[in-house]
Image (spheres, helix red, strand yellow):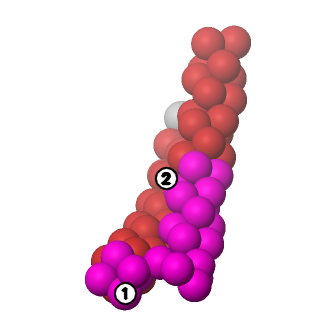
Amino acid sequence: MKDIDEMTDTTELLKKGIKKQLESAIVTLQLIHQYEECPKNISKMLYNQIGVLVFCNEELDKLFKYLNFLDGLIDYIS
Protein backbone atom coordinates (compact mmCIF):
# COMPACT_ATOMS: atom_id res chain seq x y z
CA MET A 1 0.00 0.00 0.00
CA LYS A 2 2.94 2.32 0.50
CA ASP A 3 3.44 2.57 -3.27
CA ILE A 4 -0.18 3.66 -3.81
CA ASP A 5 0.12 6.29 -1.07
CA GLU A 6 3.35 7.59 -2.62
CA MET A 7 1.68 7.74 -6.05
CA THR A 8 -1.24 9.66 -4.57
CA ASP A 9 1.12 12.12 -2.90
CA THR A 10 3.04 12.57 -6.15
CA THR A 11 -0.18 13.08 -8.11
CA GLU A 12 -1.41 15.72 -5.66
CA LEU A 13 1.98 17.43 -5.77
CA LEU A 14 1.84 17.49 -9.58
CA LYS A 15 -1.70 18.88 -9.57
CA LYS A 16 -0.73 21.68 -7.21
CA GLY A 17 2.44 22.40 -9.19
CA ILE A 18 0.57 22.61 -12.48
CA LYS A 19 -2.02 24.97 -10.98
CA LYS A 20 0.64 27.20 -9.41
CA GLN A 21 2.62 27.44 -12.65
CA LEU A 22 -0.50 28.25 -14.67
CA GLU A 23 -1.60 30.91 -12.18
CA SER A 24 1.91 32.37 -12.18
CA ALA A 25 1.90 32.58 -15.98
CA ILE A 26 -1.49 34.33 -15.90
CA VAL A 27 -0.27 36.92 -13.38
CA THR A 28 2.95 37.51 -15.33
CA LEU A 29 1.07 38.08 -18.58
CA GLN A 30 -1.37 40.39 -16.81
CA LEU A 31 1.50 42.50 -15.49
CA ILE A 32 3.02 42.79 -18.96
CA HIS A 33 -0.41 43.54 -20.47
CA GLN A 34 -1.01 46.35 -17.96
CA TYR A 35 2.43 47.91 -18.49
CA GLU A 36 1.94 51.36 -20.02
CA GLU A 37 4.69 50.92 -22.61
CA CYS A 38 3.38 47.58 -23.87
CA PRO A 39 2.64 47.97 -27.61
CA LYS A 40 -1.05 47.78 -28.48
CA ASN A 41 -0.68 44.79 -30.83
CA ILE A 42 1.19 42.80 -28.16
CA SER A 43 -1.34 43.90 -25.54
CA LYS A 44 -4.16 42.46 -27.66
CA MET A 45 -2.34 39.14 -28.07
CA LEU A 46 -1.62 38.98 -24.35
CA TYR A 47 -5.26 39.69 -23.57
CA ASN A 48 -6.29 36.70 -25.70
CA GLN A 49 -3.62 34.47 -24.18
CA ILE A 50 -4.66 35.45 -20.66
CA GLY A 51 -8.25 34.52 -21.51
CA VAL A 52 -7.17 31.12 -22.82
CA LEU A 53 -5.06 30.44 -19.73
CA VAL A 54 -7.90 31.44 -17.40
CA PHE A 55 -10.21 29.09 -19.31
CA CYS A 56 -7.63 26.28 -19.06
CA ASN A 57 -7.26 26.94 -15.34
CA GLU A 58 -11.02 26.61 -14.84
CA GLU A 59 -11.11 23.42 -16.91
CA LEU A 60 -8.25 21.98 -14.86
CA ASP A 61 -10.25 22.65 -11.70
CA LYS A 62 -13.15 20.67 -13.18
CA LEU A 63 -10.86 17.88 -14.36
CA PHE A 64 -9.17 17.55 -10.97
CA LYS A 65 -12.61 17.52 -9.30
CA TYR A 66 -13.74 14.67 -11.57
CA LEU A 67 -10.49 12.78 -11.01
CA ASN A 68 -10.93 13.05 -7.25
CA PHE A 69 -14.50 11.82 -7.60
CA LEU A 70 -13.31 8.91 -9.75
CA ASP A 71 -10.60 8.04 -7.21
CA GLY A 72 -13.21 8.02 -4.46
CA LEU A 73 -15.49 5.83 -6.54
CA ILE A 74 -12.67 3.37 -7.23
CA ASP A 75 -11.81 3.26 -3.52
CA TYR A 76 -15.47 2.61 -2.71
CA ILE A 77 -15.72 -0.23 -5.23
CA SER A 78 -12.43 -1.84 -4.14
The residue identified by callout 1 is 40
Q: Is residue 26 visible?
A: no
The residue identified by callout 2 is 67
Most common SS among magenta residues: helix
Residue at point 52%, 80% (across, down): 37
Q: Position of residue 68 (x, y in %)?
A: 57, 53
Q: Position of residue 1 (x, y in %)?
A: 66, 14
Q: Quadrant of residue 8?
A: top right
Q: Position of residue 40 (x, y in %)?
A: 37, 87
Q: Is residue 43 visible?
A: yes
Residue at point 39%, 80% (across, down): 39
Foreground label between 1 and 2: 1
Name the one closer to the observer, 38 or 30: 38
Q: Is residue 53 left or right of residue 17?
A: left
Residues under labels 1 and 2: Cα distance?
40 Å
Magenta region, residue range = 19-43
Q: Is residue 54 inside the magenta stretch?
A: no
Q: Is residue 60 above or below residue 73?
A: below
Q: Is residue 35 inside the magenta stretch?
A: yes
Q: Is residue 60 above or below residue 15?
A: below
Residue at point 62%, 42% (across, down): 17
* Dot 2 amino acid type: Leu
Q: Secondary structure at mark 1?
A: helix
Q: Earlier in the sequence, mark 1 or mark 2?
A: 1
Q: Quadrant of residue 61?
A: bottom right
